[in-house]
Image (tube, rainbow, N blue to C red):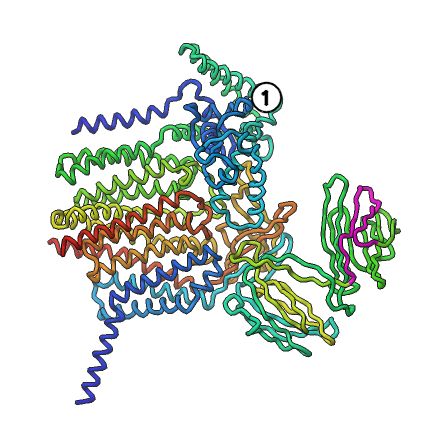
Amino acid sequence: MPQNTSDSKLKVSLRRTIKFLASLKLAVIVILAVATVVAVGTIVESKLDATAAKKLVYETFWMYSVMGVLAINLIAVMVDRWPWKAHHTAFVLAHIGILILLLGAMITQKFGLDGTLRVGIGQSNQYVVVPETDILVYSSFDGDRYTKLLEKEVDFFLDPPTKEKPLQISALDSTIKLTDYKRYVIPSRKVMAAKEKKGRHGAGLRFQIQNANIKVNVIEWLVQRRPGDLVTHNFGPAALHLGPAPEKGRGANEIYFTPQATGDLHYVVFKKDSEAPIKTGNLKEGEVFNPGWKMPIEVRALRYFPEAEEDWDLQERSAPTPLTTAAVKLEFNGEEHWMLLNDTLKLFSEGAVYIVSYGNRRIDLGFPIKLNQFSIDRYQGTARAMAYKSQVEVPDLTGPQTISMNEPLKYRGFTIYQASFQEDPNTLQPISSIFSVNRDPGRAIKYLGSFIISLGIVMLFYFKKKANKGKTS
Amino acid sequence: MKRLQIILILLLSLLVCKGSFAAPGDALRYLPVQHAGRIKPYDTFAKETLELVYGKSTYEGRGAPEIVLTWMLSPSAWEGKKIFEVRNHEILKAMNLPEGQRYFTGEEIFANEHFQMLMQDLQAKRESKEKLTPYFQALERLGNQLGVFREVAGGNMLRLIPPKEGNTWIAVSQFQGEQQTAFSALTRAFIDYLGGVAQKLPPEELNKAAESLDASVLKFEEVAKSNNPELYNHGSRLKLEVQYNHFHPFRWAYIFYMLASVLLLLVWTMNKPGLMKYAWTLASLGFVLHTCGFAVRMYLMGRAPVTNMYETVVWMSWGAVVFAAILEMIYKFRVIFFAGTLGAMVALIIADSAPAVLDPSLQPLEAVLRSNYWLTIHVMTITISYAAFFLAFILGDMGLVYFIRGEKQFEDKLQKISTSIYRAMQIGIAFLAPGIILGGIWADYSWGRFWGWDPKETWALIVLLGYLAVLHGRQAGWFRKFGMIASGVVTFSLVIMAWYGVNFVLGAGLHSYGFGAGGVEYVSVFVLAHVLLVIYASLVRKKLTV
């Protein structure tokens, strides 16, 4: 009967397909393909970094396809051997184990959490930073109350905006356009005179503080974000401010620089243990004055812009270093601004203010972690770290918990590891502890798969030996 | 036969004894010093310091302990001596120094007009936080050489007395009162002794000088101990370390392996099975020394010694002997044991002769690696699997030689070799797959993720995939004798990449604590030569079969 022949034809071709999918030939090809793809990944990692390797190799269509074929091959080979006999045990275990392991890995990738949490000493934090990045835009008419205009996940690393294909965000009365992206830049702050002088920009002062024997030499910018703001640079024994000066001093060594409507820069000096100003005057670019404190110090105005604008000077690099970051270019009302990763930018239009932020997503843990103490054990007589230790507090658990290298804290389904720490660049004292926070719903499955693979390999030997014995006798 | 064994064992015990009796004048070697994060005997400190500055552990035939102490006692005497080793040609070129020369005086280098500039380059590079290239690593070493010499000469480096508080020991330059007196007495006795050696005094007088030096060292140790007895309690550990420094257990081990492999070569090629017993004895002696050396390192550092390249090479060669012996007992092919002893010998010789790449010094662990049981287990399991692959590699090389000499003629030998390779690969996989999984468990335990595509773990996986492909190919019937032999050789390139290449070529990732530079040219030539050998053998074979 025709029905029958086509049926058997179907069966034949099905069997053939399974035979091919289960073949050793395909197995060897897939094994070599996986090896090649991941080898490329390690090279990318060495040229760039781990994130780039993930985005360019390990989490791509290619990798997933190869893994998919591997899974099909593994399933087919076991279907092909059906019904299984006792001597298949080792073979089936080893191959099923791999499938279970892959399943566990998939679950981890889909539903797991792997982020970093930074907590300053004495502070607490409950937001974990994850690798995904978002763009957020807020708007306001009065500059006080903001409403969220947009929240959007972006992956500029793989899909960067360009001049031809910009990312457009329609704001209330105009459009914000993202037109360029750079993966690796070394940023340095740049302050310049505002291009449009409409009274929206604050002033900018670049000063130098020096004493005779050059033990102190500070050169810094003070930039007001808006006219009338107060910005401060504190360098220990004294503080410099740019903004409105108070009537009375607070009893500290302070200088207030106040921009005048005339374009002059007025200064008021206060002294320790005294409320009344000890010195006032006007300062021009390039001029020096001695505030008259106990310590012999000179203050110089290197640069002064009554209306200043800040931007980033970017040095592009072909590969990342610990100093590089990513940057994205914004166009708004005909002006261009660069914005760094995890930075915010304020934009002004005729009638509204916008805050744009681009950065890593923060996920609320649902409970705060308070860092009481952080300590570094060092090898005797050296600066070489032997171990890091954090003492933290979490709700519900009484008393401080210790998290140290290789000794994580397990709490409410999360595992919190000691990853690293940050130190003050001047004093070299640790200021905050960095944890890696992790939730892995695939863990149990991966462990099960691992166990089954290992069992299979051991049995493979056992059966081989038996089979060999059978042959010789 | 019995007699020979007894003689050999006597010889071995003689060797051990030679190391364990201290001669007069040796007390100085045992003096505890705090350096690089641990308390070590002065002998080790001096050896490491001289190796850093001069690249060798002796200077003009004089031992490191003597040399390094004289740097401090009379730095001016060393001003015109060529004691700074510079090997990097780029640096020599940048400083306008003769490129054929390797040793330079301090004046030649540090007064060089370009030196400061190069150091600024290095500083700039460090501040940019980019990876240091081998050139910059060499510059870094040069800076260290200068720093260490100056610090030793200034008496700031030799920390000999435990502090009353804290844990940084007191350096010679900060000695006070009684401490200073005791140390001056020590240096006077030392100078007298050196003078005695230089004047070629008769042995009794020299002995006397040596004994008074020993007495002054012991006196000084008493003074040091009185400052903080709790921190000055080292027992026999330092003694053992000095003996370990001088006994060179791994050197003796490879000598015995060499003798064993010569006998095994005779057994295998000349068919002299009577020699087999002697080969076993010699190899066992080597193995005992090998194991002892390993155990001593373990005792001295209080951890399994598998945390740098040198230690893993030693461990891997140990595994090669074990696997070869086990397979030999099962199959009695002889060639397996021959390959095992030969391989262990080669590996140990390489470990012994390239201290710049394979650093044999005893170093404390980096913070990430501390106190973890899983770390030790996974590294040991993975590197022991490399031992099996190494065995397959050596066997493969032997097989290639037979193929080149004529396949027909050596049919039987080739069959044995290819079976052995197959077994060795199976053993390798049986250790590597669980080893990678154990690595995952460790990563999960200490970093919170089972698998993170770290280059070291990824390359271990690539090795596994490579050998799995070979075994599946064999199952499919694509690899027979020649296929197995050739893949035993070629696939080992993956092991070299995973083991050496990741650290020295890729140089990235979490496992970066073990990184360094050096030897890339040699290793590349080695790998390439073997690929060419395989191609040549396959051509020869084609011609013979056509």
Up the image or down, B83 lies above or below A237; here it is: above
Give the residue displayed 71% in from the left and 71% down from the top.
Answer: A348
* Front residue of B367 and B273: B273
The magenta stretch spans residue B324: no
Up the image or down, B371 lies above or below B181; here it is: below
Residue A84, image x, y percentages: 22, 68
Give the residue displayed 73% in from the left and 71% down from the top.
Answer: A144
- Tell me where the magenta segment starts and ends, as one range: A283-306
Secondary structure state at the residue bearing disc 1: helix
Residue B234, visible in the rendered structure: no
Up the image or down, B493 lies above or below B478; here it is: above
Quadrant in which the N terminus of chain B is drawn:
top left
Residue A413, image x, y percentages: 50, 62
According to the image, label 1 marks what residue? B180
Q: Amino acid at mark 1?
A: Gln
* Front residue of A221 and A464: A221
Residue B367, visible in the rendered structure: yes
Residue B204, image x, y percentages: 41, 10
> On the rendered structure, is A225 left or right of A337?
right
